[in-house]
Image (tube, rainbow, N blue to C red):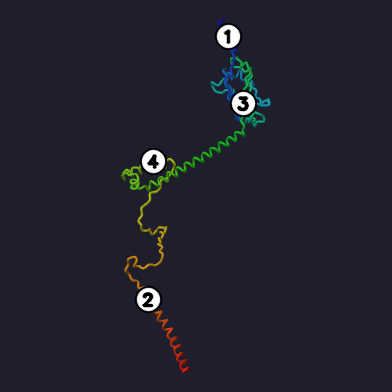
Amino acid sequence: MVMLILTFSAPAFAADGTLSFISSTPNSGGTNVPIENVGVKLLFDGNVTHESVWLANSKAFSLVDPDGNAVEYIAYPGQRAGEEGYILVLARPVPAKEGQPGQLMQSAIYTLTISADLMAVSGARLGEEIRISFETMDMAANSRLSMIVMVVMMVGVIVLMFVTNMRKMKAEAEAAALAKANPYRIAKEKDISVDEAKVLIEKAKERNQKKLEKTGGKAPDPVERTSAAPRLDSKKKEKKKTHKVKGPRPVTEGGSKFKTGRKGLKARKARADAAKKAAAEGPKRSGSGAKKSKKKGKRR
């Protein structure tokens, strides 16, 4: 008799207990719920997925849209060990493609109701209706937000590339300047020894090398020292320097004693021209004298 009493007293005690609802995902009042593959995951503190109670529990739900119209759903029990208290209610609004859940309306509030008759394998019932309301995502607003985020990211990338490129150019310019640094001039400017100036240059080059590695810059190639004579294979022609003067000057002003003979040549040419001119004018003068003598004879 004692054994019979203990055997039947436990189920009777369990049936007098209550089943408690623990949480849902999304929770009641949730927002920005995707409109595709909408599923509400429910958690209870008892085994509500046992095959002895699952047929009734799978029909203990109702899902309605903002206008109160019923939305089709499918309830799935927890499949793994330890998930006896989990139920997934997957929305399948009409029309839905075969094998694919349909879409819910955008920016709309849906309500999932859990019946008070939901029962655990122990016989405990929920005892009261549970309502879970959630709002679906506004896809237009979400698209605008995504576009804004994308634009901000693009601007950020462009700014970052510009800043990085500027740092790279600055590091390369600094490397070029350090390659031409003169320790003697630095020693004179800072009033330090040449060795100290060389140490300063080396430290500056080390810091610059770190900047180049960080920004991806490249140090300039070392400049080869060449002689002053122009190379035969050089494509660049040296520019000729021209000196402008106000007019011709004698070489004696430069300290030279060289005589070109231009002065004597000029004098001889002048004498020859004068002789030619005199020879040409001689006959004319003699002819005019004869005429005068004839005129004088007639007058006599």
C-alpha separation, residue under disc 4 versus residue under disc 3: 58 Å
How far apart marks 2 and 1 lie (CA) works out to 158 Å
Spatial separation of the CA atoms under disc 1 and disc 3: 42 Å
Check disc 2 and report its element: helix, strand or loop: helix
Q: Amino acid at mark 2?
A: Ala
* x and y, in percent, of residue 77 in the image: 59, 22
- Picture coordinates of residue 88, whole percent (x, y): 59, 24
Residue, far top: 1
Q: Residue at x 55, y 21 (%)?
A: 83
Mark 2 or mark 1: name the one nearer the start of the chain.
Answer: 1
- Disc 1 secondary structure class: helix
Q: Where is mark 1, residue-wise?
A: 9
Looking at the rendering, which quadrant does residue 232 occupy? Answer: bottom left
Q: Residue at x 41, y 64 (%)?
A: 246
Name the residue rendered at 61%, 33% in the picture: 141
- The mark tally for this picture is 4
Residue 232, label in figure: none
The residue beneath circle 3 is 134
In this rendering, which labeled residue sits more in front, label 3 or label 2? 2
Answer few, some or many: residues within 10 Å of disc 4's Cα (few below 14, many 20 plus, some between 14 and 19): few
Residue at x 38% of width, y 67% of height:
249
Say what amino acid the circle numbered 3 marks.
Phe
Identify residue for label 2.
Answer: 267
Whether residue 188 is visible here, answered yes or no, is yes
Which quadrant holds residue 82?
top right
Labelled disc at residue 207: 4
Residue 102 seen by the camera: no
Q: Nearer the viewer, mark 1 or mark 3?
A: 3
Whether tag 1 and tag 3 are in contact, CB under 8 A, the answer is no
Comparing 229 with 51, the one in front is: 229
Mark 4 vs mark 3: in front:
4
Mark found first going from the N terminus, 1 or 3:
1
